[in-house]
Each structure stands twice: as C-alpha cells, then as structure tokens.
Image: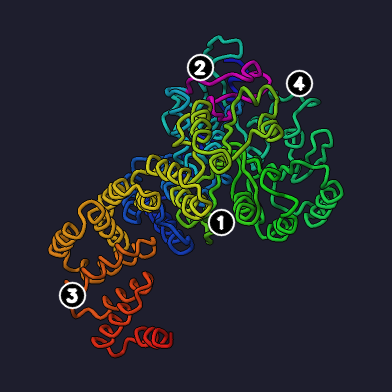
C-alpha cells in the first residue's frame, strides 16, 4: 500500500467514524420527529405543495421512510428524505447537503450533461486525459441511468432542470455508493469514449473535499484540492463571445456593441446589484449605447443561458426600458437566448419580456418555468440539522394553464458537446443569419406549407416535437382564434388547431377550439366529429353541448329541410329534455340570421312558434327576422303577438313604436 493510498484510507476511515458518531447520536424517534417537522413546514409555508404530487402520496412515502429507519444508515435516510422533498417538483424546495460533512468525499472529475450525452469537462491533473470524453457507464449503470438516479434526489421543476444540479453530484462518492451506483466509495469505475473514438475503462480515486456554491456556479470548478485541467484551458484567448465572461469566472452582467454584426449583445448572468457597477447604472449605460446607435443596430440580443436567478424585484424598471423602446424593437429585432441553467428570476425576466415586448426566444430549454414557486425560507431540522429550503411564494409570468415545469424557447437549439467543444456560437449565428424564427411567425407570414416544412425540418434536427415544442395547448388555441382567424387566415388557424389535437390529444380545449375553427370554415361534419371527441374527454360542458346541438340542427336542416329538422329536434328533446327546448331553436335561428341566411332563419323561427305557440320570445325573434327581410307588416304582426303573450316585453313595445312612426 503506497503513501497516497494510506492517506486516502485514513481520510475515508475518519469520515466513516464521523458517520457512526452521528448515527449513534440520533435515534429513530428523533428522525421521525424531524420528518414530521419537515412535512409540517412544507404545509405551513409552501403556496402549492400538492400541485405535482398528492398530499396522500407524499405523506404515505414519509410513513414508509419512518418504517424503514431502523434498517438504514444516516446517508441513506438523508437521500430518501431528499428524494421525498424532490417529489414536490419545485426547483426551489429541497434539502441541502452543505452542512453534512459525511458527504464530503468526492471523485476529482466534473461531468456536464449535453443533448448528445454526458461528458467530462474538467478533472484533476491526474485524470486530465479524460477531458472531452463521453461517459458511457458509471459503476454499475449506464450513464443515462446513473444520471436519472441522481436526478431523483435533487429539487427540480421538471426533468429539464436536472442538469443544473444532478451532474455535479455524479462526482460524489457517498451518494453514488448509497444509491448502489458504485460498490466502493474509494473508486469510481468509468467506461468512456475518448475523443479519438476509442473506448476505455478507468477508475478515479476519491478524496475529501468540502462542497461549496462554486461547484454549480463556475464551470471550471472540480471537486478536488489538487491541481485541475479543463477543456477551456488552451482556449482562454479565443473563447466565443458568449463564454468570454463566463470562463474562468462569471461576470454578473455586461454588454458589447458589435458594429460589424450590427448588433448589441448583452449577457445577463445574474439578477443582482454588482458592487462594481449597480444595475441601475448599468441599465443607463446599456440603453445610452443602444439609443446612440439605434439606426445602426439590427439585432438586440439578451443572453440569459447561464442566469440562475437572483433578485427578481430588480426587473420591472429594466423591462420598462424595453417597453419604452418598443417602436424601435419590432418583431425580429429583439432576441433572448435561453439555456439549461436559465432559472428562477431569469425565467421571471423572460415571462415579463414575452408579455411586454416582441422578443423571440432562442436556445436550449430553460430549467425554470414561467410559473413557479420561490422566495424560500430556510430552516434546520432540530435533530439531524438538515438544511431545508421551502418556497413561500407563487409567481405567474406565463399563462395560468402552463404547468410544464420548464420553458421551451420559440426556436429550439439544444446544447451539444460538439458545439461546446468547438467553441463556436451557433445560437448567436442563427440569430445573426435570421434563421431563429418563431413557428408562429412562419405560419402567419409564410402559410401552411412553409409551416409544415419548417416543423419537419426542426423534428429532423431536434428530435420529436413533443420534447421541444414551444407552445401549450391553450396558447395554440388563442393564437388560432384571436390572431389567425381575425386576420382571415382560416387555413392557418385550421392547421395549428389540428396540430394542437395531435400534440395534446387529451386536452379538451384543443378539440373544442378545433370544432369552432372547423365550424367557422364551414367544415360542419368535421366540427361535429371534434365535438364528439371533446365529449369523450369531458361530456359536461354546457356551452359546447349547445354548440354541438346547433350544429346538428344546421347540418340536418341543410340536408333534409324543415321535415328533417322537426324530427331531429323532437328526438333531441326526448333524449335531453333538460338541454333541448324552444330556446334551442331560437338560438339556432339567430345563428342563421347572423350568417345573413334570413329566409332560413324565418323558417326556423316559424317552426319554433308552431311547436311552441305560447313562446313569446319566439314571436319577437320571428318579427326581427321579418324586419331584416323588409317585411314590416309581418314584423308588426309578430311583435304584437309577442306583446300579447308577454305584456312586459319592452323590446316589442319599442320596435312597434318605431315601426308605427314610419
């Protein structure tokens, strides 16, 4: 046994002794008390604790943990409690390991997750030959499974948020051993694919290292006290613009006016007040530069891909500056770059900008959603001294129906290690070359065929659209009904409504709005089918059922005339006596009248009063239809009949007065 091995062994024994002391000092009863306090604090402070998991499921799992306490060591208990809290799916609510010394045993490599796999981006000098290697296996698991196992114990709003923290702890010897990913805390067996295409099996040795915030924040940090090497070391003088103030250390905010590219590039890495330049002063300097060169600037780019949040209360006056310049920042000039580290107050910023400006978002899927919980309270559990963060506020910057737990940008460009290692800036290049276009803009400006082609192109480049598609079901529906349809783009409205039902087949709104669009296009049978699909999901929507019955009446009236209409009306009234009545035919008649089908409306109103001779409003409606047809005498006759049946009908009185004055 060499000297280095002896030192490592003694360190490991010291940690193990600390663990045994902790276990002996804390009884099962004390752990149970801590678990009860933990559950109570979450219910006390969290604004939406059971949004992603039911209270019953959470408490049930807590009871299972209590029952297993006698069989587990301290580390296993802590990880199970972390997994329990992580099941809330709130990226701000979780158990921290910062003060847990028994976890301060690490392997000296840094892993990073990319679209094309898990890679080693930094290591101690002994393992520097692994830089740039793709990780195939970690211990007993393939790399993807190991990543998923680690991800279960850390707070995130969705799986897209795991890259922010899970990869850091793939280097933690205690966590890997406790989860069964490795067999020994001393060695980390890895199978890697080197940059030259050869596979290699290696083992890294663990050593004590005290974790800190810089592990997550700085991309060059390695959990070791020894010398380190990173994939950036030989490129520090030639880093692309977006990495130039991130590697080796991060500047909170900075900008550069690039005359040759006719753009202003602003990298926003932290929502904070920097002591070297307060954010208010920086804001003035940024917009002074923009205003001086506004006629020469084609693109204003805001990069928040490395921004994990900060003080969101600094944002309103900053966003206001963009609103004040809305005329000089039309669609296609203002861009926001997102990434896997975009989180918390950075998501707050995106949401505010989307609501108040014409910004187009570009880049990787943001870990932070537009609707989220944060503003944490931190407390220590009294016996285990575990540090716990619990959210106390709910923020909504997106639509109320958006519960995805992440934010996918308008133009998705996943972060690949190939691009990262080449030190290129493909996202910024796509913006400069006018490639970063919203799918909504393609549909509105270029039509259905171009939209279909672009959607297929993005699927070939980025994978299944279900993974990266930027819009929710309700967002698509609103765009179809409030933007496309009023602009007379009914083919486009139909296209996006059909896509809505493909992406969200169980969302009742998708089918409801498709039915409405089909009806507006005159595709009545297709509309009927959409309503029927809607009712298979949710049968109890009065407005939809009314529209459905009116549609059935219209189709039958068009195909079979008055006789068929009478038969269908009687059949529907028999089946649905609480829904079908004289008001149904009256509504149908007005549908025809609004469609300028005056004679057909008269026919339906006449049928209604024939079937319901005591229905005063039916005569009033029939009179209005005659009036629209220019048959004033018949209008007077029916207004009088309505007034006879209902002397309080003020509309009939007023209309008779006007007609008699002519």
Residue at 69% x, 41% y is 303
Q: Earlier in the sequence, mark 1 or mark 3?
A: 1
- Residue 437 image position (x, y, % from top left): 61, 38
Which quarter of the rendering shows the C terminus?
Answer: bottom left
- Residue 192 image position (x, y, % from top left): 53, 17
Q: Are marks 2 and 4 in contact (CB under 8 Å)?
A: no
The answer to which of 398 and 186 lies nearer the viewer is: 398
Q: Earlier in the sequence, mark 3 or mark 4?
A: 4
Start and end of the magenta stretch? 111-138
Mark seen at residue 111: none
Q: Secondary structure at mark 1?
A: loop
Which residue is tagged 1? 397
Q: Is residue 363 above or below residue 331?
A: above
Which residue is tagged 2? 191
Which quarter of the rendering shows the N terminus?
Answer: top right
Q: Earlier in the sequence, mark 2 or mark 4?
A: 2
């Amino acid at each position: 046994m060499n000297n280095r091995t002896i030192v490592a062994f003694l360190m490991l024994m010291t940690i193990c002794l600390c663990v045994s002391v902790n276990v002996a000092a804390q009884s099962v009863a004390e752990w149970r008390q801590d678990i009860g306090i933990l559950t109570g604090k979450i219910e006390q402070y969290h604004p939406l604790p059971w949004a992603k998991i039911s209270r019953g499921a959470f408490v049930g799992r807590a009871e299972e943990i209590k029952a297993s306490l006698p069989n587990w060591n301290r580390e296993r208990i802590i990880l199970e409690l972390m997994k329990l809290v992580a099941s809330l799916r709130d990226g701000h609510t979780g158990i921290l390991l910062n003060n847990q010394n028994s976890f301060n045993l690490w392997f000296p490599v840094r892993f990073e997750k990319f679209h094309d796999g898990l890679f080693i981006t930094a290591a101690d000098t002994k393992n520097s030959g692994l830089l740039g290697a793709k990780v195939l296996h970690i211990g007993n698991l393939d790399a993807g499974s190991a990543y998923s196992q680690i991800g279960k114990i850390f707070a995130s709003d969705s799986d897209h948020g795991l890259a922010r923290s899970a990869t850091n702890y793939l280097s933690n010897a205690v966590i890997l051993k406790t989860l069964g990913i490795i067999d020994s805390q001393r060695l980390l067996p890895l199978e890697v694919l080197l940059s030259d295409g050869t596979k290699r099996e290696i083992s890294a040795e663990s050593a004590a290292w005290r974790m800190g915030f810089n592990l997550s924040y700085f991309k060059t940090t390695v959990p070791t006290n020894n010398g380190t090497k990173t994939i950036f070391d030989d490129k520090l003088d030639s880093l692309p613009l977006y990495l130039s103030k991130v590697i080796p250390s991060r500047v909170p905010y900075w900008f550069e006016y690039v005359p040759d590219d006719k753009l202003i590039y602003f990298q926003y890495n932290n929502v904070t007040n920097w002591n070297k330049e307060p954010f208010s002063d920086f804001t003035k300097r940024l917009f002074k530069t923009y205003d001086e060169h506004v006629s020469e600037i084609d693109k204003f780019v805001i990069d928040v891909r490395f921004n994990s949040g900060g003080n969101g209360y600094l944002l309103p006056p900053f966003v206001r500056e963009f609103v004040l310049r809305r005329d000089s920042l039309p669609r296609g000039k203002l861009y926001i770059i997102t990434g896997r580290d975009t989180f918390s107050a950075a998501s707050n910023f995106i949401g505010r900008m989307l609501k108040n400006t014409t910004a187009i978002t570009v880049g990787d899927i943001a870990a932070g959603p537009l609707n989220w919980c944060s503003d944490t309270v931190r407390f220590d559990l009294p016996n285990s001294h575990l540090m716990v963060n619990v959210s106390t506020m709910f923020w909504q910057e997106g639509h109320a129906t958006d519960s995805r737990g992440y934010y996918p940008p308008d133009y998705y460009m996943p972060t690949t290690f190939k691009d990262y290692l080449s030190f290129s800036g493909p996202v910024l290049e796509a913006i400069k070359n006018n490639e970063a276009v919203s799918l909504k803009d393609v549909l509105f400006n270029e039509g259905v065929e171009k939209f279909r082609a672009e959607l297929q192109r993005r699927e070939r480049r980025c994978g299944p659209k279900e993974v990266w598609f930027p819009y929710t079901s309700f967002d698509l529906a609103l765009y179809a009904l409030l933007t496309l349809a009023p602009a007379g783009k009914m083919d486009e409205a139909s296209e996006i409504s059909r896509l809505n039902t493909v992406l969200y087949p169980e969302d009742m709104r998708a089918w409801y709005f498709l039915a409405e669009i089909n009806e507006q296009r005159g595709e009545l049978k297709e509309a009927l089918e959409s309503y029927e699909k809607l009712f298979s999901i949710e049968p109890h929507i009065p407005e939809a059922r009314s529209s459905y019955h009116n549609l059935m009446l219209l189709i039958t009236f068009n195909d079979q005339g008055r006789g068929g209409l009478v038969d269908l009306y009687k059949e529907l009234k028999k089946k649905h006596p609480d829904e079908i009545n004289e008001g149904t035919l009256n509504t149908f008649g007005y549908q025809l009248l609004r469609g300028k089908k005056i004679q057909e409306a008269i026919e339906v109103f006449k049928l209604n009063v024939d079937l319901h001779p005591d229905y005063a409003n039916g005569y009033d409606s029939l009179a209005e239809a005659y009036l629209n047809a220019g048959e004033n005498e018949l209008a007077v006759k029916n207004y009088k009949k309505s007034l006879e049946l209902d002397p309080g009908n003020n509309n009939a009185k007023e209309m008779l007065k006007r007609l008699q004055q002519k």
